[in-house]
Amino acid sequence: MGLMTGEQYIESIRNIKMEVYMFGKKIESPVDDPILRPALNSVRMTYDLAQMPEYEDIMTVTLEDGSKINRFSNIHRNTEDLIKKVKMQRLCGQKTAACFQRCVGMDAFNALYSTTYEIDKKYGTNYYENFKKFLKYVQDKDLTVDGAMTDPKGDRSLAPHMQADPDLFLHVVERRPDGVVIRGAKAHQTGILNSHEVIVMPTQSMGPDDKDYAISFAVPLDTPGLFMIIGRQSCDTRKLEGSKMDVGNQEFGGVEALVIFDNVFVPNDRIFLNGEFEFAGVLVERFAGYHRQSYGGCKVGVGDVLIGAAAVAADYNGAAKASHIKDKLIEMIHLNETLYACGIACSAEGRPTESGAYLIDLLLANVCKQNVTRFPYEIVRLAEDIAGGLMVTAPSEKDFRDPKLGPYIEKYLRGVDSTTTENRLKILRLIENLSLGTAAVGYRTESMHGAGSPQAQRIMISRQGNLAQKKELAKKIAHIEE
Ligand code: SF4
Ligand code: FE
């Protein structure tokens, strides 16, 4: 089978009988749920764009055997692939103004490809072959895969095996000849209910006592014992009110869930790490590195939309010519392109791993993500500054459509004469959505904590920053001899 169309993708997800809960109820058809559907539409965009000739080069890859796959299932074979990945993510961010979710799988594929190769080399295990078989299945069927890393972690000062409740880190509870049984949970799972499969990885480095926690595998979303509880987002129930204007972004969104693995069976050929604890840290470092690169694409694409929205709001307010407004827009562009520059730089400086797959430059990828923990907040602050207070005080669409109230809103909330009040309200709602509505989950807090909280990057920057070499440089220039 070749690439799926967007419609085929939606139907393929509809056909998976997954267990999803929200607001205390089981959701019988997540695909048709008005709160969940916008997130599905965002993933659909990764399929739709791959069908368009003008985006073929960026969205698809032709493998050595001649088959064409979606770039979201690609193993990066050179720095050009790494750069195109970032460009693809910027494009998808521009087209959705939301998290399109499919990157976590791509980043898991690439982290596992090189890590399983190295584990097998050391231990003679069969993980690399298991993983390649799984990847081929994903590529052939054009599937979306969630990459699940974050455990609940309980008491952060304790190792996995020391926790009062052993399930606070996902682990093996039973070993059988044909596979393992898993119990635990993964938190903040981006887009898992819009995925066909989930890859599970350990959440941190592990010691010899944490062997049962050093586990990685893939299972389909309808696996018995696996279920999801949807995380709510600010303003989520606006999607139930039937107003297109008040939601800000009618078509697209993101979604996260708490995923429970309640005694889930994993067959041997779906296991990619099982007890080789010293490789847990390698896998985490690589996955996090790839995902920190990813943010130099996706957040930039969403930033493009937000900057555009702020500029349109300035036009509608009649403020576009004010020098301070122009300067604020320049600052937003500068910040956004700095993020992009980091995403491109860590890709251009990528290096091959032993497996042949390319890894980004880890120092630059961590610098990229560290900037992402800051700059979107400043871009949002400037967008709010330019938009004005009306973005949070405007009446609802119902009032706007009301025969008595509508004409007053039309009259008193009008900006420049060249556009309508309705258009002005629409653009302000989009800014609201990205700044403090449903999309702020992806653009703000996920920028802070997704792919690891700021301190995780600072640890990597301190490890990779080569301070000793810098000291030597200084001593040489200063003619210091010791
Ligand atoms: Fe992709 Fe960005 Fe969403 Fe992560 S936050 S899955 S990189 S769109
Ligand atoms: Fe993320």
Image (cartoon, rainbow, N blue to C red):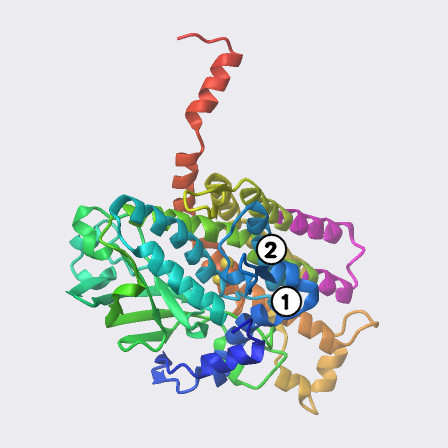
For residue 237, above or below residue 276? below
Circle 2 SS class: helix
The correct choice, above or below, for 452 with respect to 438 in the image is above
Q: Which residue is mark 1?
A: 95
Residues rendered magenta in the picture: 309-335
Local SS, label 1: helix
- Marks 1,2: beta carbons within 8 A: no
Q: Position of residue 42 (x, y in %)?
A: 55, 71
Q: Alpha-carbon distance for marks 1 and 2?
A: 12 Å
Q: Residue at x 56, y 66 (%)?
A: 98
The three-letter code of the residue at mark 1 reads Lys
Q: Which residue is mark 2?
A: 300
Asked if disc 1 is less than 8 Å from ligand 1, the answer is no
Residue kind at label 2, given as amino acid type:
Val
Q: Looking at the picture, does residue 302 appear above or below residue 351? A: below
Res. 158 mark: none
What residue is drawn where x is 55% and y is 64%? Answer: 67
Q: Judge the density around disc 2: few (<14), some (14-19), many (≥20) Cα neighbours within 10 Å.
A: many
Q: Is residue 326 magenta?
A: yes
Quadrant where the C terminus is found in the figure? top left
